[in-house]
Image (tube, rainbow, N blue to C red):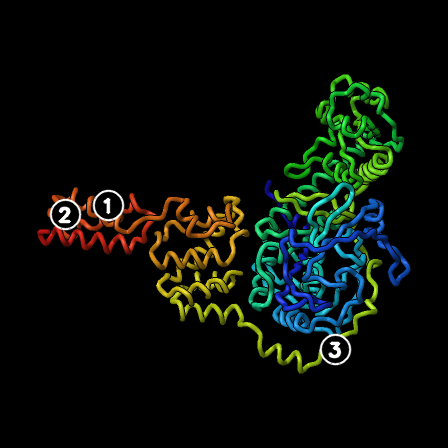
Amino acid sequence: MEIDYRKIGLKAGLEIHQQLDTRTKLFCKCPTLLRDKKESTFSFKRYLRASKSEMGEVDGAALEEEKYSRTFIYRGYDSTCLVENDEQPPGELNQEAIDISLEVALLLNMNPVDEVHTMRKIVIDGSNTCGFQRTALVAIDGNIETEEGVVGVDSLCLEEDAASRIETEGDAVVYSLDRLGIPLVEIGTAPDIRTAEQAREVAEQLGMILRSTGKVKRGLGTIRQDINISIDGGARVEIKGVQNLRLIGKIVKNEVVRQLKLLELKEELKRRGAKAETLIKNLSGIFANTSSKVIKKSGGKVFGVCLRGFSGILGTEIQPGRRFGSELADFANKYGAGLMHTDELPAYGISEEEVSALKRSFDATEDDCVVIVAAERERAEPALKAVLRRAGEAMREIPKETRRALLNGSSAYMRPIPGAARMYPETDVPPVEIDEQRLKYIRSKLPETFEHRKARYKEKFDLNDELADKISRNPNFFLFERIMESYENIPATLVVRTLTDTLAELMQEEIEVEKLEDLHFLNIFKLLSANAFGKEAVPDILKFLANQPEMSVDKAIEEIGLKVNMDEVERLIEGIVNSKRDFIREKGARALGPLMGVVMKELRGKVDGKVINKILAEKVKEVLEGG
């Protein structure tokens, strides 16, 4: 589906959350070390409740979370302390983290504040033991250049990372405390992004600028992107937790498609005179003898509502792999209740007769849709009330909400968009003054600019203008330098094309290249420099390792079938040469080219072409000299 983003009035902005590679956490002396979750030495439970901000208001998102009445279990380690447990006040702001955040701010042409004040941001989804996250504004009013124009950078904050969610145990959600408190910068752009492609470009540039400091953590989960998206007639929606850069463009496009489809559904529901009735009925009697395992699992308890005029609406696809019924199911799932509806029934073991009985219980016509949940009353009723609210919104507007990114580029409901009512001052952490002398020192140590790096690469590695520009602006430029410093016999052009074009091609094939680590590339080029395989095999090795990142490069080469014995290689070449003696004597030195093609057909990717050429040339020479 082709979309004219300017015609529909797309506005988008990014929030980038990047962990900093500091020695200790933001408010204590614990190391910024992620642990094997099996190494946990203790755990405890918490129950979190919404509280008022300094404005005397309770944030809507916090109230929504409170409705779910969850229990939270936290697992700690010998590398976490009482600050993470919320049993000891936080210490002062980490000065190393402040310096790194100021460096990033200056690279983004931002204006640092005179004094850094820490605030509390109410969050009661369990991701912080104390019910709020600490955050501090560091700089404002920056900008970055893109091919489609300048994008403003509104703010840069320094904040503590959240605890990582591990699993659920019954009704409880389990979190790990090792990540909680790791310093990270939150960079928020202005809503200046106008296309899906520009969104990805901005994310790539911000990622590269962060990595250019050499002071941020690397690897999956260390950087997360949130995307704010709206269109004319739609609503601002925040999609959280994008870890894969290649998904950003797809997520923007899919959210635009979702909102356009919801606008169409709104008009259709108005035309039908649709209505979401508030009456919730106990329908358990209909399923007394049901074959449905889903309903049996709930003890046979079934409750439902009727959506008048909604027939066919819930089955309408609004994003890849998601229908409007999926939107309603998101709300029911928040209360631990699964949702089913007559647009998709009979299914799940529910019979045609039971579907007919459902419709009769509400006097439903062909235009209506009956929605049911199989759960105890205390779960079913709030779940259905949430579904009714969302169905009612569908007839009026697209709701403002926070959604979570899904792996296929679609998204699912999380909570309402939080507002200013969730912020209030942190009284336990003193402010930090930012003087001009400190800024002057940081400015003197800033990393080189794109243009300077490009010129250096052209001179030092003899790259043409296109390749020098490509790698100097690529987030992998640090890795490029490490490889070139380590292995002088590797062509710079090969390394550049591997880190740019090859990775881009693998991403188009839906290969999860984000699972590849620097060590993978370093070891690949180490073995390539030792002629362990041919350069043509690099894409295949990367593809294999992306699917099995825990495997060593040496083992991957063996698994692919690239590992060869050089004595065997020499014997193979000698055999080919011996079989072509008459041809060699006829063509002389010109026989080398055609024979090279024959040999490469057998050894392509297994041995470097230069090595093959050298051995082959020696064997041809022996024949010509009468050997």
Determine whether, in the image, residue 498 is placed left or right of residue 610.
right
Determine whether, in the image, residue 345 is placed left or right of residue 598.
right
* Residue 89 figure quarter: bottom right
Q: Position of residue 97 (x, y in %)?
A: 67, 70
Q: Position of residue 358 (x, y in %)?
A: 81, 22
* Residue 209 figure quarter: bottom right
Q: Nearer the viewer, mark 1 or mark 2?
A: 1
Tell me the tag on residue 584.
2
Residue 149 visible: yes
Q: Nearer the viewer, mark 1 or mark 3?
A: 1
Give neighbour class at mark 3: few <14, some 14-19, many 20+ (Cα, 10 Å).
few
Tell me the tag on residue 572.
1
**Secondary element at image label 1:** helix
Looking at the image, residue 201 lies above or below residue 406: below
Give neighbour class at mark 2: few <14, some 14-19, many 20+ (Cα, 10 Å).
many
Type of amino acid under label 1: Leu
Cα distance in 3D space between marks 1 and 2: 17 Å
The residue that mark 3 highlights is 433
Type of amino acid under label 3: Glu
